[in-house]
Amino acid sequence: MLKLKNLSFLQISALNFLLGFGSTMNAQDKSPWQGKACAVSLTYDDALNVHLDNAIPLLDSLGLKGTFYLSGYFPAFRARVADWKAVADKGHELGNHTLFHPCTGKLPGREWVPPDYDLGNYTMQRLLDEIRMANTLLEALDSKTQRTFAYPCGDMKIGDSSYVDKIRNDFVAARGVKSEMSRINEIDLFNVGAYMINGQSGAELIDLVKQAIKSNALLVFLFHGVGGEHSLNVSLSAHRELLLFLKQNEKDIWTAPFVDIAEYVRQYNRGSR
């Protein structure tokens, strides 16, 4: 142990600064998300009617914001464009999920993929053109140029060719489908993990949040149906239990659109270098 009586005033001052700085860093490490323990992003895929009719009213009633990944091809987008514009006006994120939601059709369980929208039948240029046109479509609704992307079906390749690097200049970040949560300095912004929800109870969803709090991680929920309309579905009661828990624990949880969290992660990690 150092004997302080043998140290000069400047040495003692420097030592106190270092000790204080270390304590501050430890405190920051426990609250890296806007001063909170974890970050949660609520994301909803495929522009469903239930998002407008079930999810948005509950989010708005609690003052929470979500991210809605839209494909211009889907019926509930085409039929309710004005409603989606209103969603953006309320502060929710409209995310890019391509124009036609192309997926690799040759994988098991993908018999539902039509040949015209089978990613295996796409050229790289066609895919990039459709992604960028989807950005233009969404900008017409929300006037924003900063946006995030969600890989349809989690597919990131045409054949053996990845398109991940080709879209880095078009988006702040991209969400994948791997069930994982990561600490702020471990996040790959162009393959952010997400928990695909299908039938879990409210308690199970809340347990994921508690795990994120404990590990100071980013947790992304991936919803499709909310009270129906999709084979991947969360019940209205489970969805409500989760959102109420997030609201009741705002002191520990930063709940925000994916684009806001991704931009924060980028700036945070830039500053830590």
Image: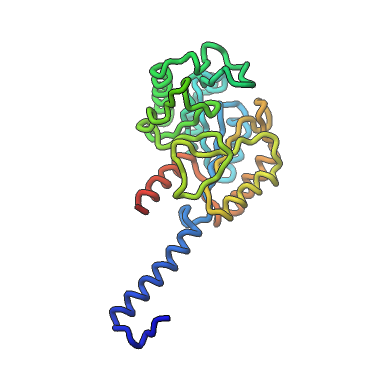
Q: In which quarter of the image is the N terminus?
A: bottom left
Q: Residue at image x 57%, y 13%? A: 114
| Residue 167 picture quarter | top left
Q: Residue at image x 48%, y 52%? A: 33
As displayed, is residue 142 above or below residue 244? above
Foreground residue, 60 or 122? 122
Q: List x then y, in percent, for residue 227.
A: 68, 32
Snapshot colouring: rainbow
The mark total stands at 0
Q: List x then y, in percent, for residue 206.
A: 65, 47
Is 266 positioned to the left or the right of 80 in the image?
left
For the question of whether residue 120 can be seen, the reply is yes
| Residue 196 picture quarter | top right
Q: List x then y, in percent, for residue 214.
A: 58, 55
Q: Residue at image x 69%, y 37%? A: 236
As displayed, is residue 24 above or below residue 149? below
As displayed, is residue 107 above or below residue 190? above
Foreground residue, 6 or 164? 6
For the question of whether residue 89 can be seen, the reply is no
> Which residue is situated farthest in the bottom direction here?
5
Q: Residue at image x 58%, y 45%? A: 62
As displayed, is residue 223 above or below residue 107? below
